[in-house]
C-alpha cells in the first residue's frame, strides 16, 4: 500500500470511526452514560469481536491488521495518532486538576489511593496464581511472579482520563468528591506504572530499566514542578498579550507538551504522565483557559476515539470459548469491583468523608477504562499476557466503566446531592504548607 492509498484509507477509517462513535454516544447519553463510555464500547464493536465476527472480510478490508508487520497496516498509523490524542487529552486533564483541594484533602486522597491499590492488587495476584497453574492465559515465558505482579497492577489501576471525563459529565469538577477521586486516581496510576516497569524489566531481564523508570519519573516531576512552572510564570509577560494567549505562546506550550511526553515515554512511564504533569503546572488563568479552549474540542471529538478503536482491534472476545474461561472472567470482574470500589469507599469513610460522598468516591474509583486499556495493551505488545487474558481484562474494563454512572446515580441519589464547588486558592496559597 503506497502513501497515497494509505492516506485515502486512513480518511475512510476516520470517517467510519467518528460516525460510529457519535451514533453510539447518542444512544449512551439516553442511557445516562457519558460519550467516552460509548467510544470505549464502540472501539470493541469495530474490532474482531463483533464487526469481524459478523462481516470478517469487510472488517479486514477496512482495518487491515498484519501482526507480522511485513506490510504497512492500520497499526502503523493508528497507534501514533491515538498516542497523540491521549497526550493532548491528559494535558487538558492536568490543567483542570485542582491542586489546592488535593492539598486540603491530601489525607483522604492518600488513604483512598492506598486502599484502592492494596486490596485489588492482592486479589489480582491470587487470580494470577490460579490462571498460571490452571489456564493458558499467560505465555510460557512469563514467570509466576511476573504474572502476579502484572495482573495485580492491572487490577489496581484507575482510568484517570476516563475518571476525569465522568467527573466533568457529572459536574463534579472542583468538589471534594471529584477532587479526592482525581487525587487518589493519580497516585494509583503512578504506582501501577512503577509496578509495570518492574514487570517489564524482569521480563526483559534488565533491572536497570526499572530503576530508570521510577527514579526518572520522580526526577521529572520534581524538575517540572520546580523549574518548568517558574519558567512559565516568568514567560507569561511574553506569552500572554491583552488577556489572550498569543500564537507563539500556544506553540511554545505545545512544544513543551511534546518534550514532556517524549521524556516520560523515553523513561518508560508512558507519554500521558508527562502531558498530565505539564498541564498540572501550567499557570492558572489566561494560559489554561485559552489552551483548553483550543485543544479540548478537537482532541475529544477527533483523536481520542482513535485510541479506543486501536484497542478494540486488539480485542478478541471469541477467544473466551469455554464456560471455565467465562467463569474466570467473572472472577476478575468480581475481584475488581470488591477490591477497588468497596476498599476505596471504606478508606474515604475512615478519613471522615460523609457516607454519601464516600460511596461516590468508591464508585468513581472503580472506573478503569482508558488506563486499563493502556496497561494491558503494553502487556500484550510485550508478550506478558495472551490475547485471551487481554480480552478478559477488556471486558472487565468496559463493564466497570459502564457500571460507574448508574451506580453513582443509585448510591449518591440523583437530585438530592448538589455539588458545591470549593473556590480555587490563588497561586501563592498552593505553595504553603498545610497543617
Image (cartoon, rainbow, N blue to C red):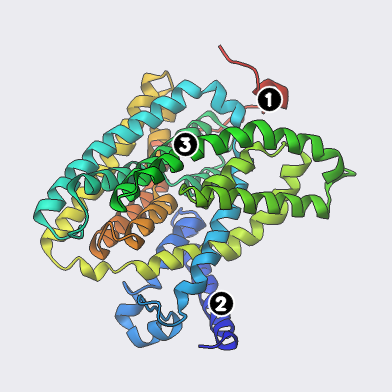
Task: Tell me, yes or no, if residue 132 can be seen here.
Answer: yes
The image quadrant of residue 429 is top right
Residue at 21% over, 44% down:
145
Residue 31: percent from the left, percent from the top? 43, 57
User: Which of 99 and 375 lies nearest the eye of the viewer?
Assistant: 375
Image height of 286 relative to 395, above or below: above
Are the residues flagged by discs 1 and 2 in contact, CB closer than 8 Å?
no
Residue 430: percent from the left, percent from the top? 65, 24
| Residue with the mark numbered 2 | 15
Give the mark toward the camera: 2 or 3: 3
Dot 1 or dot 2: first in sequence order is 2
Residue at 67% over, 28% down:
424
Residue 425: which disc?
Answer: 1
User: Which of 24 and 192 lies nearest the eye of the viewer?
Assistant: 192
Residue 215: which disc?
Answer: 3
Dot 1 or dot 3: first in sequence order is 3
Instruction: Give me the C-alpha separation between circle 1 and circle 3.
Output: 31 Å
Q: How crowded is mark 2: few (under 14 residues within 10 Å), some or many (20 or more)?
A: few
The image quadrant of residue 387 is bottom left
Residue 136: percent from the left, percent from the top? 15, 60
Q: How crowded is mark 1: few (under 14 residues within 10 Å), some or many (20 or more)?
A: few
Give the mark toward the camera: 1 or 3: 3
Instruction: Give me the C-alpha separation between circle 1 and circle 2.
Output: 43 Å
Amino acid at each position: 500500500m503506497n502513501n497515497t492509498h494509505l492516506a485515502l484509507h486512513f480518511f475512510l477509517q476516520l470517517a467510519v470511526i467518528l460516525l460510529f462513535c457519535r451514533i453510539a454516544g447518542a444512544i449512551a447519553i439516553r442511557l445516562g452514560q457519558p460519550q467516552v463510555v460509548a467510544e470505549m464500547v464502540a472501539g470493541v464493536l469495530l474490532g474482531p469481536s463483533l464487526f469481524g465476527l459478523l462481516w470478517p472480510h469487510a472488517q479486514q478490508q477496512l482495518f487491515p491488521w498484519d501482526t507480522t508487520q511485513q506490510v504497512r497496516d492500520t497499526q502503523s498509523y493508528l497507534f501514533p495518532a491515538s498516542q497523540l490524542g491521549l497526550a493532548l487529552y491528559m494535558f487538558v486533564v492536568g490543567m483542570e486538576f485542582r491542586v489546592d483541594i488535593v492539598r486540603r484533602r491530601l489525607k483522604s486522597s492518600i488513604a483512598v489511593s492506598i486502599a484502592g491499590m492494596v486490596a485489588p492488587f492482592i486479589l489480582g495476584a491470587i487470580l494470577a496464581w490460579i490462571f498460571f497453574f490452571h489456564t493458558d492465559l499467560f505465555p510460557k515465558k512469563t514467570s509466576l511472579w511476573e504474572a502476579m505482579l502484572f495482573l495485580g497492577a492491572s487490577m489496581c489501576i484507575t482510568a484517570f482520563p476516563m475518571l476525569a471525563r465522568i467527573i466533568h459529565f457529572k459536574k463534579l469538577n472542583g468538589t471534594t468528591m471529584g477532587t479526592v477521586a482525581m487525587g487518589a486516581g493519580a497516585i494509583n496510576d503512578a504506582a501501577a506504572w512503577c509496578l509495570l516497569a518492574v514487570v517489564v524489566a524482569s521480563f526483559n531481564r534488565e533491572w536497570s530499566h526499572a530503576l530508570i523508570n521510577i527514579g526518572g519519573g520522580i526526577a521529572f516531576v520534581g524538575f517540572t514542578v520546580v523549574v518548568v512552572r517558574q519558567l512559565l510564570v516568568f514567560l507569561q509577560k511574553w506569552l500572554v498579550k491583552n488577556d489572550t494567549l498569543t500564537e507563539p505562546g500556544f506553540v511554545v506550550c505545545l512544544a513543551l507538551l511534546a518534550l514532556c511526553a517524549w521524556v516520560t515515554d523515553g523513561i518508560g512511564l508512558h507519554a500521558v504522565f508527562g502531558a498530565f504533569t505539564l498541564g498540572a503546572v501550567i499557570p492558572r488563568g489566561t494560559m489554561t483557559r485559552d489552551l483548553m479552549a483550543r485543544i479540548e474540542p478537537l482532541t475529544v471529538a477527533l483523536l481520542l476515539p482513535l485510541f479506543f478503536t486501536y484497542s478494540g482491534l486488539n480485542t478478541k472476545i471469541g477467544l473466551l470459548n469455554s464456560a471455565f474461561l467465562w467463569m474466570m472472567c467473572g472472577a476478575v470482574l468480581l475481584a475488581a469491583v470488591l477490591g477497588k470500589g468497596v476498599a476505596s469507599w471504606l478508606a474515604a469513610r475512615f478519613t471522615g468523608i460523609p457516607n454519601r460522598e464516600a460511596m461516590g468516591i468508591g464508585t468513581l474509583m472503580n472506573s478503569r477504562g482508558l488506563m486499563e486499556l493502556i496497561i494491558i495493551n503494553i502487556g500484550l505488545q510485550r508478550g506478558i499476557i495472551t490475547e485471551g487474558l487481554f480480552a478478559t481484562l477488556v471486558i472487565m474494563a468496559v463493564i466497570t466503566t459502564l457500571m460507574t454512572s448508574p451506580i453513582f446515580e443509585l448510591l449518591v441519589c440523583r437530585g438530592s446531592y448538589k455539588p458545591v464547588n470549593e473556590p480555587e486558592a490563588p497561586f501563592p496559597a498552593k505553595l504553603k504548607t498545610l497543617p
